[in-house]
Amino acid sequence: MDRETLEGMRRFFSPTHIAVVGASTKNHWFANVVKNARSIGFEGGIHPINPNAAEVAGIKAFPSIGELPDGLIDFGVIIVNAKLVLKSIEELVRKGIRNVLLLSSGYAELGGEGLSKQEELTRYCRENGVRLMGPNCLGFMNFSDRVSVFTGGAVQGELIPGQVAVLGQSGASTEIMVTKILAKRLGVSLYATTGNEAMLTAEDIMEYLVNDGRTRVITGFIETFRDIPRMKRIALEAAEKRVPIILIKIGRSEKAVQAASSHTGAMAGNDAVMEGFLRQHGIIRVDTVEELVETAGIFSRCRLPRGGGLCVCTVSGGLCGLYADLCSRYGIDLPRLSEKTTASLKAVLPDFAQPDNPLDVTGSGFSKGLSEVIRILLDDENIDIIAPFSFVPESKDDVMPQLFNETIIPYVHSSEKPIIPMAFREVNDYARGYYHEKGMHLLEHIEDGFKAISHLIGYARFQKRFAPEGG
């Protein structure tokens, strides 16, 4: 991405004064804009335009775009009937406003006349230097700069800035993704929805995220790519910068293809070909929001392993069998422990313990913590990742789990091998904050967690093929 485009995108996602055309007292859209902006800590101005109201949501309203102050507004939001949209954009241009979010629907998702209207809109914007997001989308939240131009109302939780970006061709679906990411305390850099993509496409925003310097992991809900050759170039650039791309890419079934077409006018394409493309270019495909969140969490907090050998450490023989089955299902190698490792473990575990992988430290063996066990496992050259069990604290007064976890935490930060703890109890909001403060990613849902570990191993292998000399 050239510097001029990069800076233009930065300005688009960081407006200081926002005009909202069609701000109404009769629906929730403008109220959502205000609520989201205040929740994220936006310190700029929001200027509603409504010819029939002196104020909207307690904010002074302007009767028309022409009445806006000159030289102040740097972003426009349009929430009017599709018949009035082009005229509204023309008036914004006359006021020098060329960054625009179009919420209105009634375009390519309808086909026929709607597609023609969208093409007319696109031509005007290109000819007049307008950068347009939408139509038929919800907007964006820029967590890094504390700016929100978002009309959705379903994002829940503390709006924590972080290094995980969320991109969606579906607004409501990605609201679920963002909510679950925030619940895990991962933090978000940018959340953007693109809708019909008359101008700004998923590829545009993905390329920006690869280059913005704030994003460590890109996640997305994708119905289609508009430009496959360009997406290939973006994927290769992301690989060079070690920015993993994790996507829910719908279109595995005929019903999903039909849903995408009716939603944003997208053509989902041949899924077998798409699957091959994603694998070849290191793009991680997941099937559920929960799998995406666990995978993003691991990638945002763990270094890449040197190899694919996992050691699972638990406190139950039954769970050893369950975990072994899950690892087999998702292609994760559980290498045999070396003779030296086995002998060392026997020296620190109860006499009746039988060291193996998965490792059952037994109900008596965990009483002194896992410090010695993890140290021994880290020295095994066959082991590249360790997934130990972790007792989850329910509150700050729940002392025993915290003392136990103190035997794990030093290795999480000092080891070159990823250490990814697994929850041994139900996880509440306090616990999620606790692990975030300790700098650990906790596998909360074990099956999705093993899928995420499999993706981490697969991406590490891709990186070795991509950069055999280590980059």
Image (cartoon, helix red, strand yellow):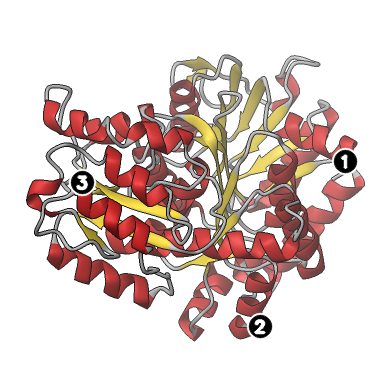
Between discs 2 and 1, the one toward the N terminus? 1
Q: Assign a secondary structure to mark 1.
A: loop
Name which quarter of the figure residue 105 lies in. Answer: bottom right
Relative image position of residue 446 (x, y in whole percent): 28, 59
Amino acid identity at mark 3: Val
Q: Residues within 10 Å of mark 1 (few under 14, many from 20)?
A: few
Amino acid identity at mark 2: Val
Residue bearing mark 1: 129
Rendered position, 218 above or below 8: below
In the image, 458 versus 295, the foreground residue is 458
**Residue drawn 58% across the image and 73% down it:** 261
Q: Residues within 10 Å of mark 2 (few under 14, many from 20)?
A: few
Relative image position of residue 14 (x, y in whole percent): 68, 27
- 195 left or right of 319? right
Residue bearing mark 2: 273
In the image, 411 versus 349, the foreground residue is 349
Please state the total of marks drawn on the protein image: 3
Q: Assign a secondary structure to mark 2.
A: helix
Amino acid identity at mark 1: Gly
Residue bearing mark 3: 348
Instruction: Tell me the quadrant of the picture where the N terminus can be found.
Output: top right
Q: Assign a secondary structure to mark 3.
A: helix
- 51 left or right of 382? right
**Residue drawn 36% across the image and 29% down it:** 438
Rendered position, 400 above or below 139: above
Q: Would residue 449 be visible to someone looking at this image?
A: no
Looking at the rendered image, the disc whose residue lies closer to the viewer, 2 or 3, is: 3
Q: Residues within 10 Å of mark 3 (few under 14, many from 20)?
A: some
**Residue drawn 38% across the image and 48% down it:** 420
Q: Would residue 343 be visible to someone looking at this image?
A: yes
Relative image position of residue 325 (x, y in whole percent): 28, 75
Looking at the rendered image, the disc whose residue lies closer to the viewer, 3 or 1, is: 3
